[in-house]
Amino acid sequence: MDNQELDSYLKIQVSVDQLSAYLLFKRITDEFTCNVDHLERFVRSKGVIHGIQLEALKLISSNPLAYCKEQTLIAKGNSVEPGEDGYIKMIYNMADKDQKPAELQDGKVDFKEVKQINNVKRGQLIAQRVDAQFGKPGKSVTGQELEPKQGKQARFKVGKNVVINAEQTAIYAAIDGMVTMTDKDKFNVFPVFEVNGDVDYGVGNIDFVGTVVIRGNVLSGFRVRASGDIRVIGGVEGAELEADGSIEVTGGILAGNKGAIKAAKNVKSSFIQDANVYAGEDVLVSQSIMHSNVKAGRNVICSGAKGLIVGGIIQAGEHVIARTIGNSMSTSTTIEVGVRPDARAMLQENRQKQRVLKESIDKADKALVILDQLAASGQITQDKLELRTKFAHTKRQNKAELDDIKAKTLELEKSLENTERSKIEVSNTVYGGTKIVIGRYTKFVKDASGRVVFLLVDSEIVLSPL
């Protein structure tokens, strides 16, 4: 059969993405016969020239009746391969695991092996941008080249004391100092302030735009504030420490219920006793947490050789992990997970903003009703016309801001209710007198249990073997 005759029997259908072509029978009679060559010429005459499946055409030509009731794939194109995303290549190792003292098998810390500071000179390269790559092109069954897409381009998050080149491909240190990444992964270079001894009356309070290294103790009543990290080689008494990065105390925190330790990222210490500690991310302790109020945006981990948590209140956004919680004397100990104090505060702030914006929109609406009536009656003056335009603009602006805040509030509410991943893990013993809270649910431990994990299952806190 020639193409014209085949056209009365057959139809070629190409998929929307141009990557597949199908043969369909319009009708079938006893007179219908064809061979592979006939079919291939017919398919090509319909514009399908790439990826033709000759084996499929052979099967159709040898037994048309078997394929007359359904469409048959007779050509396959080549899909476009996606491009690779760009990324930021750091010259310095920012991994947190390389920025802590070496921990021995027994959970003790070797204070001689402290983290290395990433020092840089002015003009020194900090990081480079590796460009996103285009993927491989594809080819449609009609022979048309399909253009590949480029991966997502990486962007620098520039903080303090760094500069970016004109091509936006590299960032450099603007001053001599230390490379660090603070909140939201911004690159910064901070000069380092070192105290070779105790923070006492000879030094006074410290408020420094950079990283503070104290090669001694921080005594009661003093304050240390840093825009980078705070490292204390000795111990911390009832002092106030606040850092936009992390706080590391190798000698332990013995606060006597005075002062506070607050870090935007992590707090690390050998022990915490009678203290108030807050970390935006993790609190990491190698020995014990005793009679303290500890809050962490993510995790509280006390898993060294001792790994003891007893007394006080421990709150974490996700996990609390310890070897032992409570003691045989049933000392009151509260452990909460699924708690994000910063998110709760932000939620309250957003709700207040919503109220203010709604009031502003309501006032604009009332004013616009009056001004629209004046305009409709032709009595509106030029100054009132300008006022009408101003109110309309303010209303649009406030409505857009309100919609944005509503979306953020909904996201926060969902995150506060998301307790599926929250858990409390005890690798040794949890004693009676311990209060367990997961999200909005509470459970009191009456009898000691060993090697357990507390989880929320169907709105109930359950114990599972570790």
Image (spheres, helix red, strand yellow):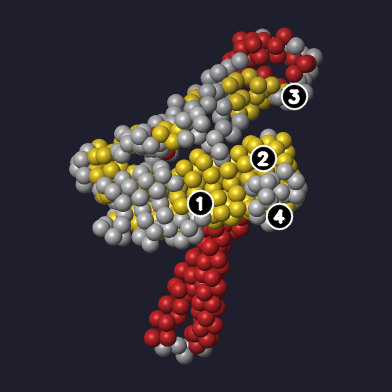
Q: Which mark is residue 429?
A: 2
Judge by depth and name the residue closer to the eye, 282 or 311. 311
Q: Earlier in the sequence, mark 2 or mark 3?
A: 3
Residue 388: image x %, image y %? 45, 80
Could you tell me how far apart the alpha carbons at marks 1 and 2 are, in whole angstroms?
20 Å
Q: Is residue 234 above or below residue 258?
A: above
SS category of the residue bearing label 4: strand
SS category of the residue bearing label 1: strand
Q: Earlier in the sequence, mark 4 or mark 3?
A: 3
The kind of residue tagged 4 is Tyr
Pointer 4 residue = 441
Pointer 3 residue = 70
Could you tell me how far apart the alpha carbons at marks 2 and 4 are, in whole angstroms?
22 Å
Task: Please report the residue visible at 58 percent of the width from the left and 43 percent of the height from the top.
Answer: 308
In this orientation, does residue 403 appear? no
Q: Which residue sits furthest bottom?
A: 379
Residue 372: image x %, image y %? 51, 83
The mark lying in front, picked from 2 and 3, is: 2
How many numbered discs, if any?
4
The kind of residue tagged 1 is Gln
Disc 3: CA contacts within 10 A as few (<14), some (14-19) or many (>=20):
few
Judge by depth and name the residue closer to the eye, 278 or 274. 274
Disc 2: CA contacts within 10 A as few (<14), some (14-19) or many (>=20):
many
Q: Is residue 46 left or right of residue 59?
A: left
Q: Quadrant of residue 99 in the image?
A: top left
Q: Earlier in the sequence, mark 2 or mark 4?
A: 2
SS category of the residue bearing label 3: loop
Q: Earlier in the sequence, mark 3 or mark 1?
A: 3
Q: Which mark is residue 273?
A: 1
Q: Which residue sits furthest front?
A: 329
The mark lying in front, picked from 3 and 1, is: 1
Residue 150: image x %, image y %? 42, 35
